[in-house]
Image (cartoon, rainbow, N blue to C red):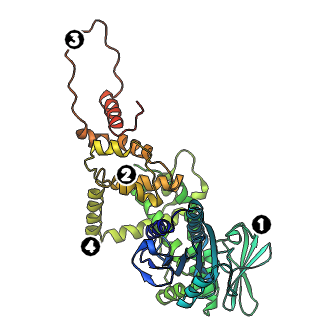
Amino acid sequence: MRNIEKIAEELFNKIRSRFERVTIGDEEGKATDDPRAARFYNFDYISRDGTNYGEITVSIVDGKSLKITFSQGMVHGFDPDQEVEWENFLRNMRKFARRNMIQFDVRDISRSNLTQRDIDQQVTNTGSYTAKEKPVTEAVQWSGTTRTSIQDFGPTRLIVRHTEAVNEESPGARSRKIESMFIETAEGERFRMPYNRLSLGRAMAQHLAHGGRIYDDAGEHIVGMAEEMSNLSFFVRNTRHRTFEDAETQGMVEAAVERYQILKNSLRGMVSTRGYQRWAEAFKPSVPADEQYDIEALKERFVKKMFDDRLTDALPYVYRAYQTRSTEQANPLVREFQGWAEQITQEASAPETADPDELSKLLAQPLIAGPDGLDAIAALSGVIDNEDLNDQIRQAVTVSGPDADVRRVIDQWFERNLDSYTSMMPAETPPAAELPTEPEPEPPANPARAESVDALRRLAGLTRK
């Protein structure tokens, strides 16, 4: 095992790269400002969509294991996407523990957070589980059989039937392979959900638990949100990465993507009691608009050579999202803000002058991305400061992981942005002119660009000599 103080400091930096407001305590549980003395790390688990699920404690107090303690009720409202995010967090912590040759332990405590008494108990007894602790296997509270999963929402229950037997050892298994989904009321009435989307089932269960009905205005609105998402999902998947020459068609695609994300976040926010109550307080029944649109004309906008009929169901929603977006953009204040945002974005992504000598030294050996690319971005700071390149590094992390060598990413980025960086290359004195003794060979398609790319690669240490 490596030096515990070094491990403590690295663990603090790793947690801080993902979460803000991390408080640390020493081996006696007392607050400290020195990361090297840290043995306890307390922070709020905030998902990437901004939802705060409560406090987590990470401990390395015994010097032999990394322990994560949390409340199972804290993650009661996770949907499948958030469960994956939680599993990725635990996986990264486990990798950190293994890399430092210490054990990894995840524990669930049935309270909202840890008290000083809990910390004192861990300081004096770190070897065994307490009566109130148990290993965690699922991120949400499920019960049931291998073919049926049940989640309680007060007097209401969400019942999920699975297409295959549930593997209890696989995290999140009860959230996958859904055959059908039902809501059961306290009176024993059971309603089948029209879509097998867990966020729909959980939102509807909250609605009934708070005195609502399946077919009241709010209940129908919740189902309508899931219906709109279902129709938009195929359209979004098949058009979001395409570019249309017609500006209005491209605007429809962008509006559909934005609308899908709004619906997804809205349903996701309703699965917790607090989130549902906020939504219910703001909910107002809407009157359906009298929309006039030509479905055949809309088809023509998205046709390649053969139109997929599954897009047809989404087109009315796409048109409605586009109309809403256009109305909002017609507001002069909105246009002024967007113009300012675009200007800031362009300035932020404008290439900065690179220092070839520093870059060559930096890239002479592997440049590891680190969590969310933070290590590589920090190393490049002052050498190349470009947000577009930083985004490419972050994207590489999502594909290859935090241990990826990003020198190839930098090489490809240089090639795409060659014109902005030509001025940094040293001028070369051409040789004295000589009369050719034989016909010159055909030049490459773009010799200046090819030579410039090679020169940049040599300067950056990306070309093997």
The residue tagged with tag 1: helix, strand or loop? Answer: loop
Q: Is residue 293 above or below residue 224?
A: above
What's the distance in space between the residues labelled 4 and 1, CA to CA? 51 Å
**Residue 217 visible from this viewpoint:** no
Give the residue at mark 4: 333
Dot 1 or dot 2, earlier in sequence: 1
Residue under the image location 56 percent in, 87 percent down: 120
- Please name which of the two marks, 1 or 3, marks the residue nearer to the observer: 3
Nearest to viewer (mark 4 / mark 3): 3
Above or below, 348 relative to 199: above
Picture coordinates of residue 201, whole percent (x, y): 65, 78
Mark 4 in CB contact with mark 1 (< 8 angstroms): no
Question: Which residue matches tag 2?
Answer: 389
Label 1: which residue?
163
Q: Earlier in the sequence, mark 1 or mark 3?
A: 1
Q: Which residue is mark 3?
A: 434
Spatial CA span between label 4 and label 3: 65 Å
Q: Amino acid at mark 3?
A: Glu
Quadrant of the image for the N terminus?
A: bottom right
* Marked residue nearer the N-terminal end (3 or 2): 2
Element on which disc 3 rests: loop
Residue positioned 33% across, 21% down in the render: 443
